[in-house]
Image (tube, grey):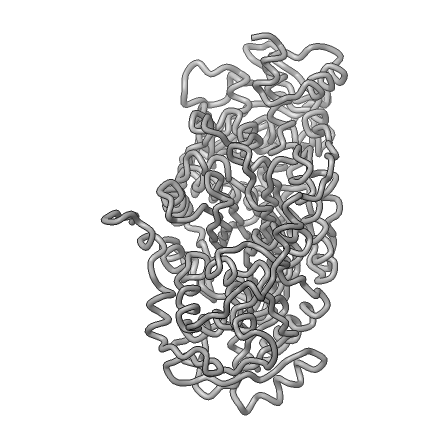
Amino acid sequence: MNIQETYSSLGLSDFEYDRILELMGRAPNFLELSLLSVMWSEHCGYKNSRPLLRRFPNEGPRVLQGPGENAGVVEVGDGWALVFKMESHNHPSAVEPYEGAATGVGGIIRDVLAMGARPVALFNSLRFGPLDDERNRYLFREVVRGIGGYGNAIGVPTVGGEVEFSRAYSGNPLVNAMCVGLVRSEDLMRARAVGEGNLVVLFGAKTGRDGIHGATFASDELSEESEEKRPNVQVGDPFAEKMLVECSLKLLEEGLIVSLQDLGAAGITSSASEMAAKGGVGIEIDAEKVPLREEGMEPWEIVISESQERMLAIVEPEKVEEVLKITERYELVAAVVGRVTGHGDMRVMNRGEVAGTVPAHYLADAPVYEREVRIPAYLEEVRKLDLEELPAPQDYNSVLLSLLAHPNLCSRRPVYEQYDHQVGTDTVVLPGADAAVMRVKGTTLGFAATTDCKGRYCYLDPKGGAAAAVAEAYRNLSCVGAEPVALTDCLNFGSPEKPDAYYQLVACIEGMSEACEALGTPVVSGNVSLYNETEGEAIYPTPTVGMVGVFEDVGRHATPGIKREGDALVLVGDFRPVLGGSNYLEIVHGRVAGAPPAPDLASEKAASDAVRRAVAAGVVDTAHDLSGGGLAVALAGMALCGGVGAEARLLPGGRQDVALFGEVGGCILVAVPEGRLGELEEHLEGVHYSRIGGTGGGRLKVSGLIDAGLDELGEAYERDLFERHAPEGGHLG
């Protein structure tokens, strides 16, 4: 293999190789080329997105740490801080769904752990192709099993998430994992190597060949040959990770380590070079001293292996013996594998000689590309929607039942029942609500978190759809009563080398940025996953938002289920539903078309803030936002969740199917006792609202168009996602 074939096989372009020659002043050897290839991959280097990410607001009154570390950090109160991050494991999950999803969970836990925090909650955002395809059913089932298998075993509750299905994700599922941790503010840890002469300790599991060039694999499009890349997918051991978590927290508690970094994509190379670059120092790694589980590994394999359940710590020499004793107590393998130096290089030693050396700041500073932008040709055509061409429903009950039974709108109970969501005993609001709610033990404080995404909206309107995802997350947190404070994201897109896909990325970031600025929710961490394509076909532009909010008194929260008979139903917000981009349009009429609802961010904020104030005041304990499926589906969800029926009337004007099933941003349904309507109205001053009905009985009735019993609605809504689309006589459980 000639040199061009060699660097091309590692994912480097001609331009990048020429750049390496210019920087190094010489031709790199294979080990050095391997270091540069993994660190300059899209997965590690963000070379197509870094300039765009600067558009995000990063600062806020509660922000303690923004982008640039393993995870973002916000203040909760009383000296407590939330550490949180979201990342993708899309490509690994496409070829090995169980391990891909499991190690995605393990990796995001270690990101939070590296900041010195105890991981306390897990979330996810999942996308698959339609369940009428056997491969998609397999991917869905195994990803859910992988998330549950890892999270349940390690003892971190999975308390929230979302899943949707569309042909755009056939062959390229999206598996985005989010973790939230708690830490005392003064105990925050940063991943910077400091102190020339300090030692580098690797601890956790042994190093093997799994995951070698996984970062490069994650930066390629998927194809028929992707199945051959199963060795690029790591294999997880949640029990080892549990020991790793407890051991790391013990080392931090005892003040035995200077800094800490997890080993994820690119393994030792990424961790060591990033720590060195941030600290302005060099690090030498002795490949011979790395504990291996396979014989015959070459130095280049050792330093880029992505074996799981490993951490890298910088330790002062006089504390190393105690560090090794504690790791042994937790039954982990540990070894001094290197030292901090003053030469500024990431240097790999083997048998007393230099096997390869690259300045750390070269590795941490991948080339940046600003690509050609072109508005996708499809946009003009798909945005066209003539309502006159759409027949009005003959049976509104039947339409509602079909929406409730569809995989995109039905109950997620079959998914989240596979997750342990109460381990740790701090879960206040269980999965199934607008957002998960957790307490900070021993205080009145709490936090809420949600994951939201609008892939179909972003396909039809990249900028508006991305803003709508941020707005929905803000709305969901407000529905449970939490003050939204900051977000993490996972930006899932196709190839940035295609001008139309790059346009989607640019427009979505612009939309998210505008929404974050308007709503006061800075972006403090995140991940970019590009090249999500299969045989040249890209996924929908799918920017996932993971937002956190805080409670001063977690006892004052709301849930979507109707609590009492005789409550008044009040619709808060400017109710202007549209069919463009709606679930109704796709499920009933088979079309993904039209202009989705454009978020009015000022109105959105006003309505959400008003509802949140009412929850905090103890006036509202029942709230649910309008999103997928519109008003009718939201009403049905509230009735089914609480086991109490409702009767509502539509607001006048327009087509009845638009009012019932059209979608809109900025609207929240609340239920309050008749005697507290006056108090509610005080909180809603200056905000659009209307009383639309009341609660009671065992049926859902809407303006004479819908009249269905809760049993009938529940039968449609609760059907098993894992069973309904099995082949005749088949079984997916």
Give the residue at x 69% y 35%: 48
Q: Position of residue 716 (x, y in %)?
A: 36, 66
Residue 547 percent location from the top left of the image: 60, 57
- For residue 374, say whether it is visible: yes
Residue sitting nearer the eye, 615 or 356? 615
Q: Residue furthest front?
A: 389
Outermost residue, top direction?
Answer: 2
Nearest to the observer: residue 530 or residue 75: 530
Taking depth in this image into account, of 409 and 595 the one nearest to the observer is 595
Q: Residue at x 51, y 39 (%)?
A: 89
x then y, percent, for residue 138: 36, 42
Q: Is residue 671 above or below residue 144?
A: below
| Quarter assignment of residue 312 | top right
Left or right: residue 4 versus residue 707 is right
11 relative to 218, above or below: above
Tell me which corner region of the image, top left, top right, bottom left or bottom right, holds residue 614. bottom right
Residue 127 percent location from the top left of the image: 49, 48
The answer to whether 425 is drawn above or below residue 287 in the figure is: below
Q: Residue furthest bottom?
A: 675
User: Residue at (72%, 23%) from the top-left corner?
Assistant: 344
- Identify which residue is drawn at 65% across, 75% down: 610
Q: Quadrant of the N terminus?
A: top right
